[in-house]
Image (tube, grey):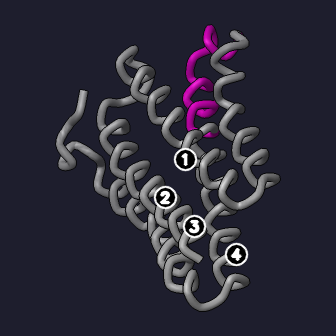
């Protein structure tokens, strides 16, 4: 199932990696500010959580969009429901205290990766997408974990 990075279409890879920049920048800011200012750390973590929520929602949208080509699955409750769950989880995360928000987003990204892996195995998503998702989810989760650690050291 894991394909080489070279199998990922170049625009998807470049834009996907570019999408990691806000994750990494806000995680670094949370880490740097952890020793300097609690308010700045909170702002960085809020920015990270907001971006994480947007991206998690986007991943659900990918699944919804994929269903548009499949009239049979588009008329089934489960596939459509699973495509909106990431948005609901992301929204709920924004209502939580910072550490809980980060943990819920980490869980959401991990679960969505598992669902996408299963969908690719069923032929519903291209195999290269799982390879890309593994890279991008790894970067997102790493960033969220850095921010979580930054919360505990201040």
- Residue bearing the label numbered 4: 42
Tell me the element at label 4.
helix
Camera-nearest label, 4 or 3: 3
Quadrant location of the C terminus in the rendered image: bottom right
**Furthest residue in direction front, as rendered:** 153
- Residue bearing the label numbered 2: 145
Camera-nearest label, 2 or 3: 3
Task: Determine crowd level at label 3: few under 14, some 14-19, many 20+ residues with C-alpha closer than 10 A.
Answer: few
The answer to whether residue 152 is above or below residue 5 is below
**Which image quadrant is residue 60 in?**
top right
Magenta residues, as a range? 61-75
Residue 23 is situated, as x and y percent measured from the top left of the image, at: 51, 66
**Labelled disc at residue 106:** 1
**Which image quadrant is residue 124 in?**
top left
Mark 2 to mark 1: distance in Å?
Answer: 8 Å
Residue sitting nearer the eye, 72 or 45: 45
- Residue bearing the label numbered 3: 152
Mark 3 to mark 1: distance in Å?
Answer: 16 Å
The answer to whether residue 135 is above or below residue 120 is below
Q: Please give left or right for residue 134 compared with residue 143 in the image.
A: left
Q: Residue at x 66, y 45 (%)?
A: 57
């Amino acid at each position: 199932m894991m394909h080489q990075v070279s199998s990922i279409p170049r625009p998807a890879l470049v834009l996907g990696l570019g999408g990691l920049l806000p994750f990494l920048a806000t995680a670094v800011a949370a880490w740097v500010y952890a020793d300097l200012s609690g308010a700045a750390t909170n702002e960085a973590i809020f920015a990270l959580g907001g971006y994480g929520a947007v991206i998690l929602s986007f991943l659900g949208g990918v699944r919804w969009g994929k269903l548009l080509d499949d009239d049979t699955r588009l008329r089934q409750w489960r596939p459509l429901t699973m495509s909106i769950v990431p948005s609901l989880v992301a929204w709920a995360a924004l209502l939580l205290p910072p550490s809980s928000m980060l943990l819920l987003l980490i869980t959401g990204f991990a679960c969505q990766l598992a669902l996408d892996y299963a969908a690719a195995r069923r032929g519903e998503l291209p195999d290269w997408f799982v390879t890309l998702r593994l890279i991008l989810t790894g970067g997102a989760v790493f960033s969220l974990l850095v921010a979580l650690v930054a919360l505990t050291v201040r």
